[in-house]
Image (cartoon, grey):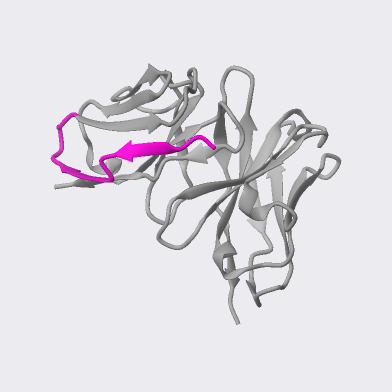
Amino acid sequence: EVQLVESGGDLVQPGGSLRLSCAVSGFTFRSYWMSWVRQAPGKGLEWVASIKEDASEKYYVDSVKGRLTISRDNAENLLFLQMNSLRADDTAVYYCARFISSGRDSFDHWGQGTLVTVSS
Amino acid sequence: DIQLTQSPSFLSASVGDRVTITCRASQGLRNYLAWYQQRPGKAPKLLIYIASTLESGVPSRFSGRGSGTEFTLTIRSLQPEDSATYYCQQLNTYPLTFGGGTKVEIK
């Protein structure tokens, strides 16, 4: 069974940092693109970042470039989102998702989400 | 960036009704469009990919159509468990984007 479990969400002050993790199981992690998607309270979904299987390609939404960094550890089946210089508008539930490319393009499995609150 | 406009943003329908949600893109997507269902407090769930292919395990009352810039999601016979918000997503071009969502309420 495919499972994605996020952790690391917390209350943090503006300008602070946080590192989110996503532990995956049930599939060959190193063979898949992965992504982060966020959802501000009461709002819609926003794609944040995606990373290729071998981490050779990374893509970000403009609003997080230079502040948030996606990475992965294929040996440990872990996906990360390093969040620096956090702002109030980064407050959201952050989901990790498996990204299927090449013919079935979609996010086919999602974690349950972890809440990041940026507030003083 | 490619903008996705969903309509309507809210709809209320009865059990057994046929409902259709539209997703219009600001640029052509070929067929790289997916649909998701999100129930309150839950993670999104993939329903349809490549515009019209039903994800495994999704009931056949869900269907998707379209190409280019206009796409639709249809629920053939609305069921109580279909009460949720539905999102389209384009995977043609970075940055990937989602539509604003359509909340479906059961009367």
Between residue B54 and residue A24, name the one nearer to us. Answer: B54
Residue drawn at point x = 43 percent, y = 21 percent: B51
Residue drawn at point x = 62 percent, y = 42 percent: A3
Corner quadrant of residue A120: bottom right
Q: Is residue A84 magenta?
A: no
- Residue A104 position, x and y percent, is 56, 21
Between residue A75 and residue B36, name the one nearer to us. Answer: B36
Classify A114 as above or below B57: below
Q: Quadrant of the N terminus of chain B?
A: top right
- Residue A42 position, x and y percent, is 40, 60
Residue drawn at point x = 59 percent, y = 63 percent: A90
Residue drawn at point x = 50 percent, y = 34 percent: B2
Q: Is residue B10 magenta?
A: yes
Taking the image as drawn, is residue A81 in sight?
no
Classify A31 as above or below A71: above
- Residue A105 position, x and y percent, is 57, 25
User: Left or right: where does residue A49 sit relative to residue B101?
Assistant: right
- Residue A31 position, x and y percent, is 75, 28
Classify B30 as above or below A89: above
User: Left or right: where does residue B93 sit relative to residue B86?
Assistant: right
Q: Which residues are magenta?
A: B1-18
| Residue at the extreme right of the image, as rendered | A75
| Residue at the extreme bottom of the image, as rendered | A120
Between residue B57 and residue A43, name the one nearer to us. Answer: A43
